[in-house]
Image (cartoon, grey):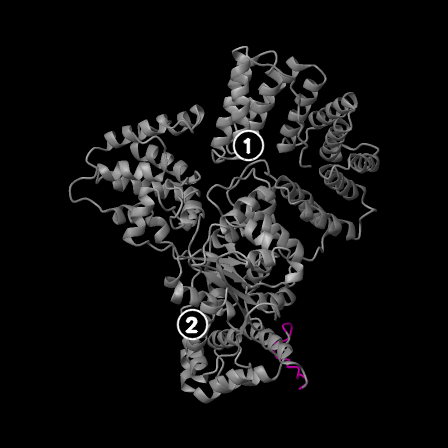
Amino acid sequence: MRDRLDFSSISKTILENRKINAMSQVEYYFCLFRYAFEQTNLAVTVPEESEVSKIISGQRNVSKDIIYLYQTVIGVTELENAIRKILNDVSDSDYVKEQIYRILWNDSSISQTKKQELSARYNHAAAFLSDVLLFALSRNFLPRNKKTAGSELILSDYLLDTRLPSVTRTFVGREKELQEIHEALQQEHSIFLEGIGGIGKSELAKCYAKRYGKYYSNVLYLRYHENLYRTILEMDFIDDSMEMSDDERFRNHYRFFKYLDNKSLVILDNFNSVPEEDFLFHAFLSMHFQVLVTTRSHIEEVPCYAVNEIENIGDLKQLFFAYAPDAQQEPEITEKIIEEIYRHTLTVELSAKTLKASGMSGKDFLQALRTEGLSISNPNKVILTKDNLSQKQRLYQHIQTLFQIQGLSPDALDTLRNMVLMPQNGISKILFHTWQGKSDWNITNDLIEYGWIQEDTVHNQIMLHPYLHEVLLLETAPSITKCGNLLKGIFENCILYGIDVPYYNELLNTIESIYQNIKLDDTVSATLFMDTTMAYLAKYGRMESVEQVLKLMMSMPDYGQNNRHTAICDCYAGYVEYMNGRYQKAKQHYLHGLELLEPFHPINADLISNLKNNLGQTYLALGDTQIALSAIEEAIFIRQSYGTVASHDTLVQGLSYAQLLAVNGKWREARKHLFSLIRCVKKTDGMHLFLAELYSTLAIIESKKLPEDSLNHYKKAKQALIDGYLPKNHPEIQQIEQEIQREEMLVRGLNGGKIHIIPRLPHK
């Protein structure tokens, strides 16, 4: 009997009970996920037959994009319809249903509550199997074949996604460069492809991986983001969990690179830094694997390969004609256009797409390029440029001109403006449109066709080329007022920060990117957005980002004049000080914030409640337990008395109160309060990790007086952590295991000890 409920065990059970001459594994896989494969806006490819076999056997993962898609309302319905069709090819659907039901109930890693929830629609086979399969897809995949000594490392045993990004279908030329890079990597441990932005370094690196990947045991592609620490941190590993700290996650990821041998190749794309500014640079390059880096910088201490303009004008014309076929009728004009833009690869592609979109003649288009500076407000006005501008400046102006020639619609401009706020290493196409509240992707697809947005069809990600980002930041001028639809979507995700979401890392990166690129032209809306997003950043320990947002808030015109805004700033500044162990400074911030909000007004009840709660936690850290308890009681009283909206903060304050009751010897009251919180949290989906914290606190309080109850609640805490998708080897689960063993000894009367409460600070 298979003892783990996952995609593999469910699929094997269904396939083993097929009728004679029924669907193959590939047909089953395609039928199951037909809705995903038929999405015109997503490039979800059907894997090879051998790859399907590995997915069904549990050696490979179902694509993350497929899982995201089926978590939508439409996706759930489509999955149920697909299973209904598949069951028509099964000899005994009731038997299959019963077998999967047994797998579910024999899986000890699933809680009884979850098992009952998944069994609710047992009488309807397709609905039951749909619920179970969707749950299985959302669980962390645990590799069945761990790496043994002397065996070749398998990337998919560690990484959620091992696919290389797509190479543009119009890649031309560069045959000489590809060969020379390959020869250089036979001699050198690392090669840095250097050249100006938009010249084609990234496509050259991706094409090299596709062309020469067979020479390596593993090829891994990384987009450089801020620094190597951040780049490695943001990789998606199988055993990651949302409760890991950044340092824990990084150590887990960094350890993986030590397993790679000298037959592995790591591509580091867009290294926009210098060795002196990245403390991991030399350590990363000293590992066994080979490294291919793309960079705009010239780094003296490493082997470099200069990537210049494509030499053969015929190749460039071929690239131009691929996007503007009608230009073949004017080859001489096309050549002059290419020379006018300095044979710059990105601008050649963008020019061809603009020529086609504008409907201009080649001659008029060339004239427009030569007369720089078309005005958006008056497209008929042409401003002549000076002849002594540098090539980089002229290329920049050429792109501005192309942007203005296309005359994009207001909706297209809005989409580009929102894209400027996305992380430069890319964003999921699904998430981008979800946050904008747009189900129609046609505008985005048009902008991809026009060349303004790049698309990685393998990973279903979209991004702006770094070179284009500079132009579009100026041309679209994203601001609080202009990007309201996107900010609303982000806000709605963050205000429910107690609910865990699988895409939290993408959301955090987007929040950080927003603050780097947006103009804060509405202080009221900006402060509300900052308040909510800082809570989300704090939840995941992005304290440096919280500090950056605080600096922005302090730089706004009404800082120091608007007492509420200044008190919000004090609330988070105090939290930063608390997290750094500077409790006296934290206390000063909280007291100052409360002073600003006097005399009391109900509109500030929620903020005052949070300030008092955090002040209480700070007093506890300073050893003043009675004052701490009083402050937290006041916080709860204010929240309850003035009808503030119940939120995650309400629950965290409740936990703080229970902990302080226990510290002050009122363990019965603390226990009663925790039971009330547990009943509340169990009604809400997606709060397993907080539920585990409640059970753990309850177990600690009960340890000396009610050891049997304590043991039971530690076990429930462990189960909640597993339900929250933490891997079994996660430190938090291992710690709970130790507590369970200790409590089992207490129950047998073999051990005893003093219990200490470790309080948790709310994120606001």
Going by the numbered disc 2, the residue's amino acid type is: Phe
Q: Left or right: where does residue 475 sit relative to residue 437? A: right
Q: Main secondary structure of the magenta part?
A: loop
Q: Which residue is mark 2?
A: 171
Quadrant the N terminus occupies? top left
Judge whether residue 386 is colored magenta: yes
User: Does the magenta-highlighted stretch encompass residue 280?
Assistant: no
Does residue 167 show up?
A: no
Secondary structure found at label 1: helix
Compared across the picture, whether 637 is left or right of 724 comes to right
Which numbered marker is on residue 502?
none
Work out whether mark 1 precedes mark 2 in sequence or the reverse, and give the earlier one: 2
Q: How many marks?
A: 2
- Against 608, residue 116 (above or below) is above
Calculate the distance from the C-alpha at mark 1 to the C-alpha at mark 2. 48 Å
The residue where tag 1 is placed is 732
Vertical arrangement, residue 139 with respect to residue 332, above or below: above
Q: Position of residue 152 (x, y in %)?
A: 38, 51
Q: Looking at the image, which residue sits at the far bottom?
A: 332
Q: In the image, residue 499 lies at what x, y percent?
A: 55, 36
Q: Quadrant of the C terminus?
A: top right
Amino acid type at circle 1 is Glu
In the displayed orientation, state which residue is furthest to the left: 20
What segment carries the magenta color? Answer: 376-387
Left/right of residue 379 with respect to residue 350 in the rendered view: right
Q: Nearer the viewer, mark 1 or mark 2?
A: 1
The front one of 140 and 131 is 140
Task: Judge left or right: residue 677 versus residue 239.
Answer: right
